[in-house]
Amino acid sequence: MGKRFYVVTRDLHLYVGLFLSPFVLVFAISVFYLVHSRVGREAAPPGRVVSNLPVTDELERLSGRDQVNSVRPLLDRLGVRGEVSFIRRIPKEHRLVIPVLVPGRETTVELDLQSRTATISERSTGVSNALIHLHKMPGPHNVNIRVNSSYMRIWRWLADVTTYGLLFLTFSGVYLWAVLRAERRVGIGLLSAGAISFCGIVYAVSH
Amino acid sequence: MPSRIETLPAVRPSARRALDTFKLWSRKGHYYLGLYFLFFLWLFAFTGLLLNHSWMFAEFWPNRKVSKFERPVEVPQTDNDLDRARGLTTRLGIKGEIEWTAARPDSTVFEFRVNRPGHTSSVTAYPEQGRAVVEQIEINTWGIMRVLHTFTGVRAGDERNYRDWFLTTLWVISMDAVSIGLVIMVFSGLYMWYGLPAKRKLGSAALMLGTVCLRIVYLRPAVDILEPYRTAARPAVA
């Protein structure tokens, strides 16, 4: 029973680890960009203009998820795909500004509700921003509209799988190490050193 | 008569020793790093879940404690804003990362915020009147954990703020170390797996599945697959 449990745990640790390795690399590498990069947003180049759009005044009155749901068919029609980051309303000009994101690309749609036109500008945001975007999504902001695109629905699920999988890898890893008697002393030393550094830094930073 | 061993291709002993050492340290490094960073990994994994799911049990903002006090204090007279702020926080007994909140149109007021996980102090000082008003917000343990996940002292596109507290730098170094550790663990894991021929087929399938899933989201967003079916619906460009 004990041996079988060990073998199953070892195999699961291996296969789960292999499945998660690309995701772990994305999360780990994006940390360097998140922590050290100071690059801001660049202005998008002038975009194409689309006229004669079937927009209604109701679009301006809606808010939150309802507004995103109403804008979606229009974005599909314009060939703009991705996650609606937020919708900024400029009431005086009867305009809506809608940034739409996919990893590595940001499309901004400026919708003029009076003239029924849309200006669409697109810019490539590069690998670093793509990794940052994936690391931060879906995140705690704009919760009422977040996960409004197909890729974000998949990514939310994959991000959860990565986190739960990583937790499984840590528990199974500790078990697999504990079985190795020869490594117990060094392992306990490192585990204690890690615990002391972790508690020490967290205490110092937060007290 | 030559033995079976003598017919094997010659491998230089020093190269073999180096390879054996590399193999041994790949394995040892994999679990040594995992054990050292265990608590950091638990924190970042769990807070990652907290950030992505607004779980009720981990709410912290409605339970925050807000307090305010006013104190007579002399604002240090130096040209450097950071030195002034540091001097003032020392006198007020506040520590943390200094954040410049907004441009100051009123030169008679000196405003900034001091952050550390769990505590935010908004300082409004009146140098000519020799007093300062401090509003403090304290959050609970769930909030502290969440802030630790994102506590870097900088924000992309924010040129005004930079890391100015040595403990923020120490925390950022920890984040970097955990990330480097994870990258090493991924590659040492891949190397150890490659050394197991019996696990290669199923392992390749697991690795391939992970890569394909990531590719669907990142390299070619799933929605793009629908592109040919949507092009027909596009209106004419003016």
Image (spheres, coloured by chain):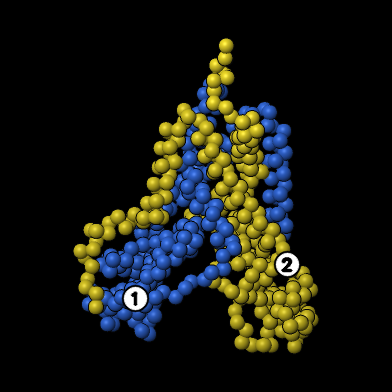
For mark 1, what is the residue?
A: A47
Residue that appears at 45% across and 35% down: B203
Classify residue A55 as left or right of residue A163: left
Residue that appears at 38% across and 81% down: A91
Residue A47, given in percent of the width and then of the height, sits at: 34, 75
Residue A60, given in percent of the width and then of the height, sits at: 33, 76
Mark 2, secondary structure of its residue: loop
Q: Which chain is blue?
A: A
Quadrant in the picture for residue B236 = bottom left
Q: Nearer the viewer, residue B235 or A6?
A: B235
Above or below, B107 relative to A82: below
Above or below, A39 relative to A188: below
Classify residue A62 as left or right of residue B118: left
Q: Chain of mark 1?
A: A
Residue B83, given in percent of the width and then of the height, sits at: 74, 76
Above or below, B18 relative to A116: above
Q: List the single residue furthest toward the front.
A: B1
Residue B71, given in percent of the width and then of the height, sits at: 76, 78
Q: Nearer the viewer, residue A10 or B180?
A: B180
Q: Residues within 10 Å of mark 2 (few under 14, many from 20)?
A: some
Q: Chain B shown in which color?
A: yellow
Classify residue A130 as left or right of residue A49: right
Q: Is residue A94 visible?
A: yes
Q: Chain of mark 2?
A: B
For mark 2, what is the residue?
A: B95
Residue that appears at 21% across and 65% down: B233
C-alpha distance separating marks 2 and 1: 47 Å
